[in-house]
Structure formats: structure tokens, C-alpha cells
Amino acid sequence: MQRNVATSFFQRRFFSQQKRTQMLARRVVEPCDVFLNHRCMDTKKTVATLLYDHLRRHGFRPFLDNKNMKPGDKLFDKINRAVMECKIGVAVLSPHYTDSYFCLHELALLLACNKKLIPIFCDVKPSQLRVVNNPKWSHDELRRFRWALDEVKSTVGLTFNSSKGNLSEIVNSASDIIIGSMIELENEERMQIKNLPIPV
């Protein structure tokens, strides 16, 4: 009797551990569908994290560096893969955004990969955004970053003024736009699959 109870306990524990491992493996392997591009010092504790949490609650798999990366990950490999796998990019542009190599690199990559991009201008107007002449950046990088910033400045986006606006409103508005865009993209993919010629 005791042997059966012990065996049953260990089987439950083993299968529970196995199920957790499978869930973790699935989470690691699943590509992100929304890439959140932001400047850490400006928006990580506000718009970016709240938007990440909101999208997760709605069943999406957003990518936010401090939530999806772990010790041992190769920085550029993980970020570049997430950008290439995502369907939609959200650029949370802020006063110090253009000081960051990573922000501009991610933005340029999102646009070069022809991802749908939703800009959120947070405490900054599009006309105020300029790429700084950082001597550490190559001429090609500066050219690529300026091109990406010009593209995003001419894209319709959301605006948010943290001294006057309601944070939950911008997060809800951005989520609604992302969800609507995701539905549009999935419908386009279905139509493309439906219109594929049938091999004879």
C-alpha cells in the first residue's frame, strides 16, 4: 500500500515537472508576435511594461527585453530573431530614444523587414526626433538610423503627454490598434493561402 502511494506521488511529481518543462520549452520556442521597441530610461516602467502586460493578458506573445531575455542570451541574436519573427512592431518614441544605438537598430531592422510599425510618440513630437552624430556609429549606421527615423516620423501614430494624459488610455488605445492590426494581418495571410494555386 505504502509502495503504491509513494509510486503514485513520484509519478505525479515527475509528470508535473515534465509538464512544466514542456510549457517552458513551448514558451522559449514560440516566436513573439509584437516587438516592443522603447528607450528603457524613459518608458520601461510606464508605457512599455504596461503594454507588455496588457498584451499578455489578451493572449499575445510580446517581446520586451527585460521580460524575454535571460542571462546567457546573446543580445543581438535574441533581439534580431524577435524582430524577424514578429508580425507587428511598436516603437515607443521618447525624449532620449535617439540617444540609444539599440532603439535605432531595432527600429531600422523592423522597417527593413517590412513589419507593420505602430509609433507611440511619448512626451516628444515627431519633429523633435533627430539622430545624434555619435562618433562610435559608422556612416552606414547613421544613414540607416536616419532613414528609419524619417520613415517613422511620416507614419501616423499615437501621442501621449505624461503630464496631461491618462496612462491606461494610451495602453488601451495602443492595444486596440495592435489587436485590430493583428486581425488584418491574419486575414491577409488567410486570403493569400486561399488564393494559392493548387498543384496538379
Image (spheres, rainbow, N blue to C red):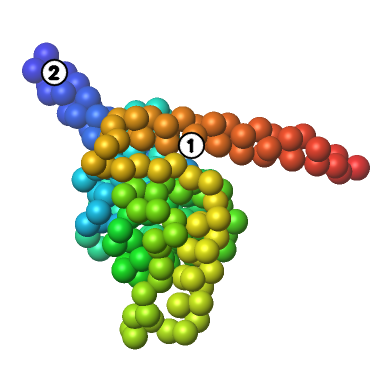
The label on residue 11 is: none
Quote the CA–CA distance across marks 2 and 1.
50 Å
Numbered disc 2: secondary structure: helix
Q: Nearer the viewer, residue 103 or 189?
A: 103
Circle 1 Cα neighbour tier, 10 Å, few/some/many (<14 / 14–19 / ≥20): many
Residue under the point 25% across and 54% down:
42
Question: N-terminal of the two: label 2 or label 1?
Answer: 2
Check if mark 2's residue and mark 1's residue have beta carbons within 8 Å: no
Q: Where's residue 162, x and y in %?
A: 26, 42
Left or right: residue 200 versus residue 86 is right
Place residue 37 in its image quadrant: bottom left
Place residue 49 in its image quadrant: top left
Q: Nearer the viewer, residue 168 or 58?
A: 168
Residue under the point 44% across and 56% down:
126
Q: Quadrant of the N terminus?
A: top left
Kind of residue at badge 2: Val
Q: Residue furthest left?
A: 2
Left or right: residue 183 versus residue 102 is right
Q: Is residue 2 above or below residue 190?
A: above
Place residue 187 in its image quadrant: top right
Q: Where's residue 84, x and y in %?
A: 51, 57
Q: Quadrant of the C terminus?
A: top right
Q: Is residue 135 visible?
A: yes
The label on residue 5 is: 2
Kind of residue at badge 1: Ile
Q: Nearer the viewer, residue 163 or 147?
A: 163
In the picture of the structure, the residue carrying the numbered disc 1 is: 178
Q: Where's residue 10, x and y in %?
A: 17, 28
Numbered disc 1: secondary structure: helix
Left or right: residue 195 versus residue 182 is right
Q: Is residue 70 visible?
A: no
